[in-house]
Image (tube, rainbow, N blue to C red):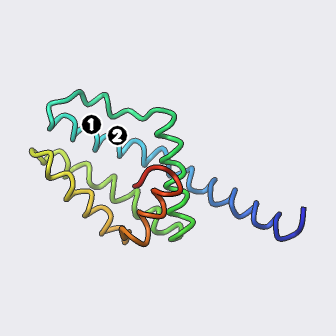
């Protein structure tokens, strides 16, 4: 293995490993938001639990966000999802959750074309 290949692999593993420490927080917050949305829709909030497939795709998406935009943006995104839980509990219409998601992305500095489209293409799920 060449020096460039080794450096690339180390970089990929470092990004993946660092994004992984955000994953439990992201999962807990997103499950809370999704559970609230399901409740508002009259559905079972326990359906918001993540499957292993969802966890894998979301881990990929978070790592890709960090790779594309850096650690501070990934941290800001997870923080914004956590902050949104309080607001979600005040929402009474399912349609309002789209606006909440847009605010999360805007507040974290995440853009649709620049960030979400490539992440979704690579990981099979967006943020």
Q: Residue furthest front?
A: 121
* Residue identifier under label 2: 31
Q: Is residue 60 left or right of residue 91?
A: right
Residue 88 position, x and y percent, is 20, 48
Q: Are marks 1 and 2 in contact (CB under 8 Å)?
A: yes
Categorize mark 2 by other alpha carbons within 10 Å: few (<14), some (14-19), many (20+): some
Residue 64 position, x and y percent, is 54, 60
Q: Is residue 11 left or right of residue 104?
A: right
Foreground pick, 67 / 22: 67
User: Which quarter shows the C terminus?
Assistant: bottom left
Instruction: Using the rendered view, name the quadrant where residue 11 is placed.
Output: bottom right
Q: Residue furthest right?
A: 1
Residue 104 position, x and y percent, is 30, 61
Residue 80 position, x and y percent, is 33, 59
* SS label for mark 1: helix
Up-down: is 30 above or below 119? above
Residue drawn at (46%, 39%), measured in percent from left and top?
54
Residue drawn at (90%, 61%), measured in percent from left and top?
1
Residue drawn at (75%, 61%), measured in percent from left and top?
10
Residue drawn at (22%, 49%), measured in percent from left and top?
86
Q: Is residue 97 left or right of residue 8?
A: left
Q: Is residue 110 left or right of residue 38?
A: right
* Residue identifier under label 1: 35
* SS label for mark 2: helix
Up-down: is 35 above or below 118? above
Whole-angstrom CA distance, mark 1 to mark 2, is 6 Å
Instruction: Using the rendered view, name the quadrant where residue 5 is placed.
Output: bottom right
Number of marks drawn? 2
């Amino acid at each position: 293995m060449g020096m460039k290949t080794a450096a690339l692999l180390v970089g990929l593993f470092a990004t993946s490993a660092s994004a992984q420490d955000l994953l439990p927080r992201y999962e807990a917050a997103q499950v809370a938001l999704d559970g609230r949305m399901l409740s508002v829709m009259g559905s079972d909030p326990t359906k918001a639990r993540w499957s292993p497939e969802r966890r894998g795709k979301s881990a990929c998406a978070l790592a890709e966000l960090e790779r594309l935009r850096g650690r501070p943006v990934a941290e800001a995104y997870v923080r914004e999802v956590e902050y949104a839980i309080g607001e979600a509990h005040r929402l009474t219409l399912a349609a309002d959750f789209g606006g909440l998601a847009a605010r999360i992305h805007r507040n974290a500095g995440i853009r649709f074309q620049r960030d979400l489209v490539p992440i979704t293409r690579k990981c099979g799920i967006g943020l």
